[in-house]
Amino acid sequence: MAKVLISKKACTVNPLKMSQPVGGALAFMGVKGCMPMLHGSQGCTSFGLVLFVRHFREAIPLQTTAMSEVATVLGGLENVEQAVLNIAKRAKPDLIGICSTGVTETKGDDIDGFIKLIRAKHPELDQVALVYVSTPDFKGAFQDGWARAVDRMVETFVEPPAPGSPRRRSLNVLPGCHLTPGDLEELRDIIEAFGLEPLFLPDLSGSLDGHIPDEFTPTTLGGISLAEIRGMGLSLASIAIGEQMRGAAITLEHKTGVPYVVFDRLTGLAPNDELMAFLSRVSGMPVPNKYRRQRSQLVDAMLDGHFFFGGKKIAIGAEPDLLWAIASCLTEMGSQVTAAVTTTASPLLERVPAEEVLIGDLEDLENRAANADLLVTHSHGRQAAARLRIPFYRLGLPTFDRLGAGHQVTVGYRGTRDLIFAIGNLFMAAAHEPTPSTWLPLEPQPEQLVQLGGA
Amino acid sequence: MSNLSNKVQEVFNEPGCGTNQGKSEKERKKGCTKQLQPGAAAGGCAFDGAKIALQPITDVAHLVHGPTACEGNSWDNRGSKSSGPHLYRTSFTTDINEHDVVFGGEKHLYRSIKEIIEKYNPPAVFVYQTCVPAMIGDDIESVCKAASQKFGKPVIPVNSPGFVGPKNLGNKLAGEAMLDYVIGTEEPEFTTPYDINIIGEYNLSGELWQVKPLLDELGIRILACISGDARYHQVASSHRARAAMMVCSKAMINIARKMEERYSIPFFEGSFYGVSDMSESLRGIAKLLVGRGAPEELIGRTEAVVTREEARAWQRLAPYREHLQGKRVLLITGGVKSWSVVAALQEVGLEIVGTSVKKSTKEDKERIKEIMGDDAHMIDDMTPREMYKVLKEARADIMLSGGRTQFVALKAKMPWLDINQERHHAYAGYEGMVDLVHEIDKSLRNPVWEQVRRPAPWEQTVPAGGRAVRAA
């Protein structure tokens, strides 16, 4: 449907996009006892760290190989080795997740080779898992880094089930990076209601949901354990949420034979009907009453809300999967997506219900949003919304100027219902009060007079 | 590259830096910062430092030449305020791709500069170098020179790629860029005997505006602040100032010293944090100006303002003593000069149980010793785990630190106050000190602490008809 364009500008103004390595690092943050690390100069880590601290309002475990200019030119083996040893000693992690950066990719460091050398030299590190994922800053975007890191974890850890081993009543869930810890909690409730045990990879709801641990932990505070990841081959099925997770789901199926389904979104009525039907089929259980009730509430919310959504023009800036989810849902409420800007390529883009989807920046979005009734993007859109004087709905990472970004829920019947309320309320608040001059006829133009006279 | 490494050596050789002068030739060559430890490092890179130092210049387009990480992950994350233009809050980056990495990014950079000038027409464009283009050999100096000539507008290279060192080095390299390409290139419309530069003040949360009214009252004009709420023209014509105050000692000492050398502008090192420091700074400015020929009576007028403002500040601080007496503070700070804040906090009865001196100079440490008496209070580099322990064991009542360690305190269910660059409150001058103490008081007295420390119902046993007691 949509024509996919790539911005022709040389200079990116007000970036929408964030880089692959921080996306990869965030995926590692959904694993228990993990210390993610960027192989690059210490600024790469520092910027990522501040980004996540501002969004989640949590302590963020993220380390660096602190590459200097000389080390970069000579190669980073020594730095990776020292970093791994230091982290193992200080933080005692189960897993160190290593992402490359632009500068070490430009040099061409062979990190898988480094890991082999480090392993041979340091048998004391045998208890620490090391996973490396290639995530150059100058390619792709945040969601690509996340997807690649999850794929690498599936490839590295998930074990093929022994022949004849019984399936467990568990369901693998591979969530895209556009899902919040709150979204995962919602899905956990839904899946458990069907008597299934969900295994989220990664599970940010265990680590970045904002809870108070009993002790100080230098690594992630929770998440899926390595043992749980290894056992994912025994599940009944896998669901990938977001097109970005298809790759990891396929890898999992190839390794273990666990069949997968991709839900390209879980925001909106129809996709959640599909989820309910799927869960009912896999579990052999009827849809619990709670969700029949919630479906009815969503339908009611759509009826109540459609007055405010109908005909509204909406400008959205988001990564492909989030753009697809939100654009589809708002279009189904009667709104029109008049500007869609995203960060990276995806097979979803041409399906987005808009005339064009531009891989570009927030300057492009602002230019295309001049006549919009609502701007939807992450917090960096705040300056554009202020200049445009239109309502602004913050969605996506980073959301640093509002509380509770980690608990914003847009999946499930209930999440969709609340999203409709939140955006509908913005439209209501922005409605123009009529004045005596609202309905004054415009001065007729001369050519109109001619036409009128002729009629 | 050799050009850049010469620059780095030059900065390491800073004669204005006492620590540096105490070192042997060999040590000096190694540089002024600790070697970064892989796997145990925290803090920004040299690019980060350069950007922090210059971005507060509000009417300039700040263009980052690099992959999306350097700018895309970090923009609009500091609270430096502007009284006018907002272009500094618009983010510009070349966002280089694989093609650039293979074939070089110089043309991409040049076209980006062109687009910015056509669309935004700023008085100047600053181009920040980053690791990847530095690695592939993009010569930003040449591109900037060519663009300057072509577009008839200053295009300034800031050569401080992340991997040359930490944030602090980047501050200094940014200073070098100003000295080499900006300062002294324009002339002010007029000068007065009361013109000063303030160097190393970034107007975070508008702190400069807590100080400026008093300078205005004294008739002292800030010719240029480098770089808080500055305009390009002010920095470019700052060489006509009569005197300068250097605010953040380690960040931009090279600017202050070289401006003294080149333009005979005397400077002193001062701080706007703390009541007595603020007074000393006002006196210092007046003294230097009079030394350069301003009328003598400025000193008397300054004393009158100091006397009035100090009395007013202490009077406003006094009521807090009652609540704050004996409360213990853990002070983990970078930029804000510890000792001057320490004195003011003690004045209202707070007890400092520890202060970090990671970024303090030798003289700072002497001062802290003088004020607090006990060496053990000084912490060179406290790990988050240790901070957590101090707070969890209630050896301190509140922690003042930067955003990175915020959650160490909050997870220990202890009050915390942001005193770093991302903070939302302004703590400079007499006004700022009262605000800081007010914020500490507000935080300590918030009823939320009592609530959040309540044990959960399943953590307590309820004897029949009795009150809840904590389970063993």
Image (cartoon, coloured by chain):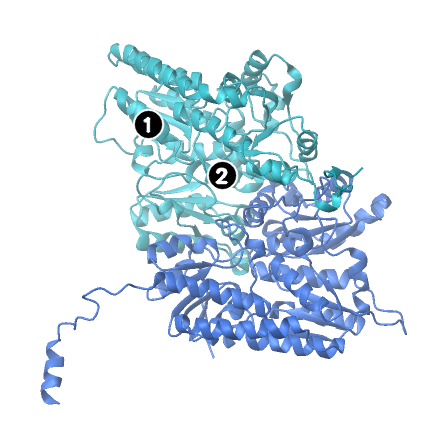
Left or right of B83 on screen, residue B80: right
Distance from the alpha carbon under mark 1 to that under mark 2: 21 Å
Q: Can residue A273 be seen?
A: yes
Write down the chain letter for disc 2.
B
Q: Earlier in the sequence, mark 1 or mark 2?
A: 1
- Report the residue that reaches farthest toward the front: B465
Q: Nearer the viewer, residue B200 or A39?
A: B200
- Labelled disc at residue B212: 1
Q: Residue at x 64, y 63 (%)?
A: A186
**Within the image, what quadrant is residue B261 found in?**
top left
Write down the chain letter for disc 1.
B
Q: Residue at x 53, y 68 (%)?
A: A417
Q: Nearer the viewer, residue B99 or B381?
A: B381
Label 2: how many residues lie within 10 Å, few (<14), some (14-19) or many (20+)? some
Q: Output the letter for the chain in cyan.
A: B
Which percent across, then down, holds residue B202?
Answer: 42, 33
Above or below residue A154? Residue A57 is above
Q: Secondary structure at mark 1?
A: helix
- Report the residue that reaches farthest toward the bottom: A455
Q: Secondary structure at mark 2?
A: loop
**Within the image, what quadrant is residue B118 found in?**
bottom left
- Labelled disc at residue B161: none
Q: Chain A is shown in which shade?
A: blue
Mark 2 residue type: Glu
**Within the image, what quadrant is residue B406 found in?**
top right
Left or right of A221 on screen, residue B114: left
Q: Can residue B15 be seen?
A: no
Query: Disc 2 marks which residue?
Result: B422
